[in-house]
């Protein structure tokens, strides 16, 4: 994996996660687990990241910034997460549409 998109759009257990039209809630515990997964992958890749997770309503549920992450990443992560919720598609899908 060489990019942020590959990290977060990667298949889980061999099957890609598909966005749902159904409004779902994510618990703080689950948000923390996803954040921990992202942190571990970033550490494996030696890539400091900023992580932002929003629920289906666009509410920020979890956020962290690793040491030495790019300064701009803090604002980009929030906007990228909100855009994915607002457009109901991953960044990869959006890039294909443009």
Image (spheres, rainbow, N blue to C red):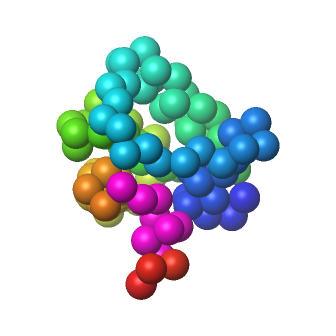
Q: Position of residue 34 (x, y in %)?
A: 51, 30
Residue 96 in the image: above or below residue 87: below
Q: Nearer the viewer, residue 73 or 4?
A: 4
Residue at horizontal 43%, vertical 71%? 94
Question: Is residue 80 located in the magenta-colored stretch of the structure?
Answer: no
Residue at horizontal 78%, vertical 43%? 14
Image side of residue 79 versus residue 29, left or right: left
Residue 72 in the image: above or below residue 69: below
Residue at horizontal 31%, vertical 51%? 85
Res 71 seen here: no
The residue most toward the right is 14
Q: Position of residue 19 (x, y in %)?
A: 47, 48
Q: What secondary structure is the magenta-colored segment mainly?
A: helix
Res 88 seen here: yes
**Residue 58 lies in quadrant:** top left
Residue at horizontal 30%, vertical 35%? 23
Residue interval drawn in magenta: 88-95
The residue most toward the bottom is 98
Q: Position of residue 13 (x, y in %)?
A: 76, 36
Q: Nearer the viewer, residue 58 or 4?
A: 58
**Residue 98 lies in quadrant:** bottom left
């Amino acid at each position: 994996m060489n990019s942020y998109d590959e990290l977060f759009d990667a298949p889980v257990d061999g099957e890609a996660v598909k966005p749902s039209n159904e409004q779902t809630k994510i618990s703080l515990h689950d948000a923390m687990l996803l954040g921990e997964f992202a942190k571990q992958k970033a550490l494996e890749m030696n890539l400091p990241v900023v992580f932002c997770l929003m629920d289906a309503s666009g509410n920020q549920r979890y956020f962290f910034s690793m040491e030495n992450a790019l300064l701009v990443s803090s604002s980009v992560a929030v906007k990228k997460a909100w855009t994915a919720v607002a457009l109901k598609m991953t960044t990869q899908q959006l890039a294909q549409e443009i």
